[in-house]
Amino acid sequence: MYSLTLGCGFLLACVYLVSAIAKLRNRGAFAAFSLWVKGLPLPGARATGVAGGVVTAELLVAPLLLYPATRLAGYAVAGLLSAGFAVGTFVLYRGRGDVTCHCFGSSEVVVGLPHVMRNVALFVVAVVGAGTDLSTPAPSFSASSVVALCAGTVGALVFIFLDDIISIFVEPGHARRSFTEDHQ
């Protein structure tokens, strides 16, 4: 079970670290993210403060997951971020059809059901990681640990490049159109 904890933690650390770095890669990237946050339906929130809080929380996930004493806190931060993002992307998806995704920096991809599902899946990864961390003492590093780190890396790459993977199989806008037409 420790391998599962290790894989989940590494996946979440990679995803949130890449997400934060994409938003902080230069002043323009953070300004674009702050402007994007300003357009969200957040009552009374200051865009720069919320944007800064999100990026700070994303940056905290990796170091918190690194040490056994803070690992549960890391899973909690990752779980809260993922749950908040899932709810937020669902609200955007159902309410406004023109909002682009800023999960990993600026994008031309409109927020859709895949973004909601990605965040729900990240929440599940955080819950599974926390659950297995609570039930498993940390053994020494082994071959299964290497496999877990590799699996976490592959999983993180799938989450990070999900928009690109989907674009290989689905025409732009097609998945959103067919889902909304079926559920009106």
Image (tube, rainbow, N blue to C red):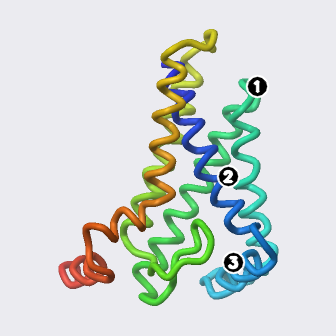
Asked if residue 163 lies left or right of residue 24, the reply is left
Asked if residue 136 lies left or right of residue 179, the reply is right
Q: Secondary structure at mark 3?
A: helix
Which of marks 3 and 1 precedes in the sequence? 3
Residue at image point 67% right, 80% down: 37
Cα distance between the residues tagged 1 and 2: 20 Å
Residue at image point 54% right, 30% down: 149
Q: Nearer the viewer, residue 171 or 88?
A: 171
Q: Residues within 10 Å of mark 3 (few under 14, many from 20)?
A: many
Tell me the residue that label 2 is attached to. Answer: 17
Residues tagged 2 and 3 counted as in contact (Cβ below 8 A): no
Q: Hey, which quadrant is residue 39 in on the image?
A: bottom right
How many numbered dots are placed on residues in this image? Answer: 3
Name above or below for residue 12 compared with residue 36. above
Q: Amino acid at mark 3?
A: Phe
Tell me the residue that label 1 is attached to. Answer: 69
Q: Position of residue 145 (x, y in %)?
A: 54, 20
Name above or below for residue 41 compared with residue 143. below
Name above or below for residue 6 compared with residue 142. below
Q: Position of residue 44 (x, y in %)?
A: 74, 83
Cα distance between the residues tagged 2 and 3: 16 Å
Q: Amino acid at mark 1?
A: Ala
Residues tagged 1 and 3 counted as in contact (Cβ below 8 A): no
Asked if residue 6 lies left or right of residue 111, the reply is right
Residue at image point 21% right, 84% down: 181
Q: Nearer the viewer, residue 88 or 28?
A: 28
Numbered badge on residue 33: 3
